[in-house]
Image (spheres, grey):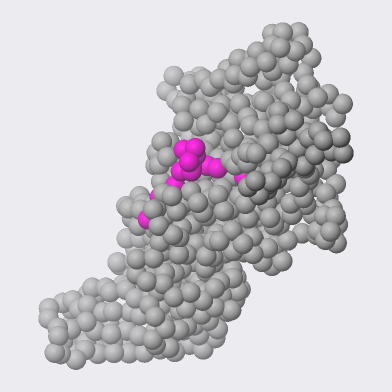
Amino acid sequence: MSQTPVATGTSTPIEFHSFASVVGINFGNSYASIADGTAECIANEDGERQIASAISFHGEETYIGSSAKAQLVKNSQNTIINFRNLLGLKFSEIPAPTSPLTSAAVIQHPDRPDEPAYKVTVLAPAPAPAPRGSLPPTSKVGTPAPGTPASEPNTVERILSVSEISSIFLKSLLTSAEDFLGQKVEAAVITIPSWMPQAQRDAVELAAKNAGIPVIQLLEEAGAVASTTTHPTWTPEDEVKADRTQLVVDVGSSSTSLNLLSIRQGLSYVVASSTLPTGANAIDDRLIKHFATEFTKKNKVPLTVAPAPADSVQDQRAEAKLRLAIEHTKRTISASPGAATCSVESLKDGFDFTGSINRMRFDMVASPIYTEIANGVVDLLASAGVDAKEVDEIVYVGGTGSLPGLDERVQVSAGFGEDEVVTPFTRGIVQGGGIGDPTTILARGAAAQAALIVSLPAKGTTEDKELHDAILGAEAEQVRKVQATTRTLGVLFPISEEAAAENQQWKDLGGVFVPIVQKETALPTRRTIQLTVSLPESGEKRVALEIWEVKEGIRIEKIKSEAPADEDDEDYEEEEEEIKHRVISKEVLLGAVQLLPKVVDGAKTVVRVQVIVGIEGNVDVEVSEVVPEGKEGAVERVHVPGIEA
């Protein structure tokens, strides 16, 4: 496991024992999930691993999750959704709704200035029982005092702040985790979006602590993805390189976050990021309209949805029912190439509705949203100066990220070469709750981070203390300001012109280049490689090498396609195919080393090259001879102060 530089947040200095019970919580605006210390998702009491961020009050009952969302149909005024994003905001900062409300309205708290809250109706608490032997209260005429019959219980209005609602919801997640683990949770890491300002981050942590959750860190979502995808359970190295460039597509309810991560030796660095104003709700709206049109055609009953008219209660309820039903439709489409159904009893005017949609039709309905996300990926890569060929892996986050059509559109539109980029779909790890399931990645990453933190050694040495401070202390906020290399750093072994003629890259560079520190590696960093080097056949036995910063790029080769044998030459239009090749060019010579081996056995020797790049960009290179134990080998060192990071 590894600490990711994109991980940020506040913390509490807690001492842990080696068997501490830890969890990771993905607290999303639409859905939440929980994972234990082994990075496995936990189901709540209703068997849900993707738990709707919703709370509903009905009489004496409090519903949470999918059962709460079901209350949106007939009890919307007492059902609260989309509350996470309001944490830490003032009432005056919340924009007015632009469409008819489908859930409880956000109001100004009557007792707390400029604080948002919700007003719900609940049963009044039962009166305290009268003392034993006392008579019930009576009226002046000796009859029982007037009161509400037991069949018509008293109701009262209850005001709940956004923080209180969040605490109720988070408390339910904690209860589910402790019921599953069979013991008290001692530490938790909670995910937060990167755009969330400090005031809202503090509000998330406060709501969690009021729920009894022992928060040790708030982890940015990109950091949670990195924690999951660098965890040993993610993938063997023969499928995905340990050092790789990773594109993260996080499709939220109302927006989509794109992050380009550089993962080097388990550490990650955000190269570029962007947010699109379109998310899963846009796909849901298009799907709802599709089924509403089908309903109207079948039953000749007009149905207007997404949004439903403010003056039509029937259309509003129909839309709420469709929104619940299409969750099943999307899950089915994501798991099966066949058709998926959408069934609703008494959708409108007493008419039931059952419709179906196959994957091809579904992708046509969602196509504009797919295209917008794919175009956002193209823009992100362009802004970072990264070619699609340089991206090694794509990771999807969120329920909509489970749709194969989205992956196909992103790959084609952004120009990712076939078999050149790895995705959870190409690896077949999405379906059936696999490790690539987009709905579980954030919670599992948070759990992996929690397990890492509790495994930290005690602050016995200066190095241990620095590690604690970097991850848990006040300086953890500096992690977001991490520096990274802009070029690849490595060593060049000169070779003869005759040998270089065998390879165009060797010829261009004048030798064989071995990368050691890849570009976009977070600083400070230490990298070590060990190589077997051929020695000159005659003359002095020595190892010569140069230390270079190189620039990586893409060379495009255009190849004209040949006409098929069965084509008429006059009608055939010649086409050009573009083939991309990764290339490097020498940029900055940092130094040269000549090592005279002390222990020579044959025509080869083994050398170890260690490169350390400091936070300020200073470089220290040590080239040493690898010799049997008890013998002393040759060592040469080079120091380069303050190169460009």
The N terminus sits in image quarter: bottom left
Residue 552 in sight here:
no
Q: Position of residue 319 (x, y in %)?
A: 72, 26
Q: Is residue 38 above or below residue 601?
A: above
- Residue 284's place in the image compared with 236, above or below, is above
Q: Main secondary structure of the magenta part?
A: loop
Q: Is residue 234 visible?
A: yes
Say if 459 sits above or below 493 in the image.
Answer: below
Residue 420: x percent and y percent? 44, 46
Q: Which residue is more in the foreground, 340 or 550?
A: 340
Query: Quadrant location of residue 505?
Result: bottom left
The boundaries of the magenta stretch are 38-53
- Which percent across, then down, holds residue 360? 56, 23
Q: In this rendering, is residue 433 above or below 15?
A: above
Q: Residue at 24% x, 84% y: name it.
A: 625
Number of disc labels = 0
Viewer-closest of 330 and 39:
39
Of 567 and 370, the residue lying toward us: 370
Task: Tell me the quadrant of the picture where the C terminus can be found.
Answer: bottom right
